[in-house]
Image: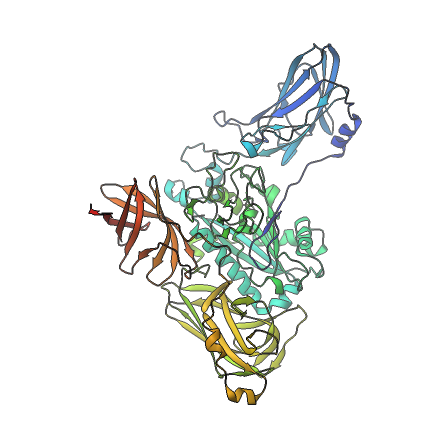
Amino acid sequence: MTAIIDHISLYTLRRHSKVFFSFLLVAVILFFPTLASAQVATIDLTAERNFVYQNGVYPEIGEAILPFVVTIANPGTTTIENLEFTVALTAGASLGNVDSECIESEDSIIVLTCTIDELKANTSKIIDFFVDGPNSLGVGQGFEVIITSNDATVLEPGVVEATLADGERRIRGSNLFVHLVRNIDIDIDRNNVPDLDEAIINLPASTPIDELLARQAVVDVLFIYTPAAFQYLGAKLGSRVANILTTSNQIFRENNVAIKLNSVGIEQIPYTINDSVILDTFDALQEKTDPAFDELDNLIISSGGDLVVMMHALDTSITPQCGWATLNATGRQGDFQALHHRGRLVIALNVGPDCLGVLNLAGAFASNMGIAPSREEYPNGGTFSYSSGYGVSNRFITLGAGIGTQEFGSALALNRFSDPQGLCLSIACGVDRSDIAFGADAIHSLNKTRHLVSAITASVFNVEPSAIEDKISILDYGYDLDVVQTTVESGALVNEFTEIDVRITNNSSATLSDIDLLFAHVNAGSLVEEAQYYEVSSSLCTILGNALSVTGLVVGDAIQKFGTLNCSIDRIAPGQFLDFSYRIQIDATPPVLNTEAYYHELVTVNTIPQLESLVCIPVFMTFVDASAGSTVCSTVQSLPLTFLPQQGQPVLDEVATVTGTQLSIPYIRLDNGSLISAEFKITNFGEVRFELLSYQTLDSSLSPIVEAFFTDTGLLSLFNILVGGINYDIQVTLMPDSNPVTLGSLNIVALGSSL
């Protein structure tokens, strides 16, 4: 497991699995003592995979029968007589084709007692049987198969063993667990829409197939919060929920994942343990060990929640992690049965002072839906083998993969899910799902299971996907939101309040929603997390203390408090602006530059620093010093900033490349100065065109060696592209009203000649 890095919205994922041990099964193991090393006969128990389908009533489906093979080998030089072994299985499993050497008995467990009358030297014998999935529903989620013997050594997997991690589904050992799952791909009417999905969607039979295939799934989220979370966030608790949903929905939408998250309630629970780490909170939530969760199941059913997010506030330095989330349905082939998963898709989130920047839960929600962080950390993947995040060391990582871990070094974190069909910084975003060992295709996995997840808990009030607004939040530099701060006075006195005006302007063409503003300090060009005394009266803002116990002072219609200033904007339309002001008390602590005192502050929007918001004010010890004035801010404002809004540093010498029918352009400078990376599919239906597949917004302050340019007239200019051994300059024009975005009318110029 990889812990969340401080103040970064990346969730450690914790595998959730429930092993079906019974007392009698353990007793069977203990009954047979450990074998002496002098014995030479060996027993090898294998099965071709670790799951069997429970709904294989149709012959064409297959995989409803799982064979088990027991290979008994005598590598010695003498005959072995009356060799015995026992196979114990969970009660409820239905066996077939049991060889005559075995006697089957059943009480609380199923036991096969097998005897090999004679096994000649240097020979082997095979005993086999199968488990019938459709007739084994009584075992629940799955069953164990345990083999023991006094007369032979049961082989265990070696250091190098064929598994999912190296391309083989076969399982082997003395104690195997096999999942009993539904085949979620069964499609009896052969319309390419699985029968389970059709039953959940429940649209008329006349509904066009394309509409069924594209149908979005509404996944309901129940938010619960503790008294500590309410005391700390107060009126901003609802804003935090809205921000989480808007951000996550936008990421799903931009990654072509047909899921919309819908809040079905924000309920308080009486959880009062405030002196432990968030992992303890997560464990209590997952296992419902605290009385505070006694009514949680009722809350889930009465609200229709498929997922649960618990918000709890922990004090400064209580825990370095900001949250934990379950990894569900591991190895279960996407079968999110309500019986086994209701109340199990949970996230515990610390909303205290150390985690104010945690707003993006898309990776955590994906974990709930069976996406493992990476194949490096989870070699067998998530719910499918390919249900995994992906990364390339020191280049990029997708949502859910570990930031700063040994596997990926200083990789750039992207708001992308793994997808072998897309490009991330000119590299494939994943690995084809047919690759059992390394496949990584989170987008396919999420889309494949979306309706099953949406049906974990019956909806109390059914919501059509179209009823959930496609809100746009600030997740990168793709939308132009200007944040400008202006000092009211020309200077500030130490330990006195000074006023700063703020204007937020939406210069983009889209309405922006659920914007979270945090005011941070800058010291010598770097962001500094340093609490100060603020005073604010705007209804947009609140002051979140640097500790849970910090209380505020009412001054007229304003609040004074020591902590971090946090403001929320529900919605701001194109061209609209909002004004408010705040006051800050500047003490004698740094920032200090060249012995001259100054105060330097910046605003982050959804954790993204807004460079235009930098404000500087000189700070004086006395009014006598102030009367002399200061030029320090003219020096400070010209300093380069050492922080970057994204983690890691992209390679700036990359150029556009063509691979087959895919065109990757690592850097395109847009007319408004923003910077993106984009991938296009090259089509040729009478005319060569570029069809946009995906894009990623980058830090606009980067200075790549080679940039493409896209103007407001729709002209894209590419330079020095190598195709077939020749370098070309290409201009291509946006086709009006094209969907997906398509560019045509190519003008191609080769070096030295015109084509």
Q: Is 417 left or right of 233, judged from the image as shown?
A: left
Residue found at the far left of this picture: 754
Quadrant containing the C terminus is: top left
- Residue nearest the viewer, comparing 753 with 99: 753
Residue 684: x %, y % from top left: 26, 41
- Residue nearest the viewer, comparing 333 with 5: 5
Residue 662: x %, y % from top left: 35, 43
In the displayed structure, 681 sits above or below 114; it is: below
Choose top left, top right, bottom left or bottom right for residue 65: top right
Please indicate, yes or no, whether residue 405 appears anywhere in the rendered image: yes
Residue found at the far front of this picture: 594
Choose top left, top right, bottom left or bottom right for residue 66: top right
Q: Is 95 left or right of 579, judged from the image as shown?
A: right
- Residue nearest the viewer, comparing 108 with 439: 439
Residue 331: x %, y % from top left: 58, 37
In the displayed structure, 223 sits above or below 431; it is: below
Residue 652: x %, y % from top left: 41, 53
Q: Is 721 left or right of 47, judged from the image as shown?
A: left
In the displayed structure, 592 sits above or below 3; it is: below
In the displayed structure, 661 sits above or below 63; it is: below
Q: How many marks?
A: 0
Please indicate, yes or no, whether residue 208 appears anywhere in the rendered image: no
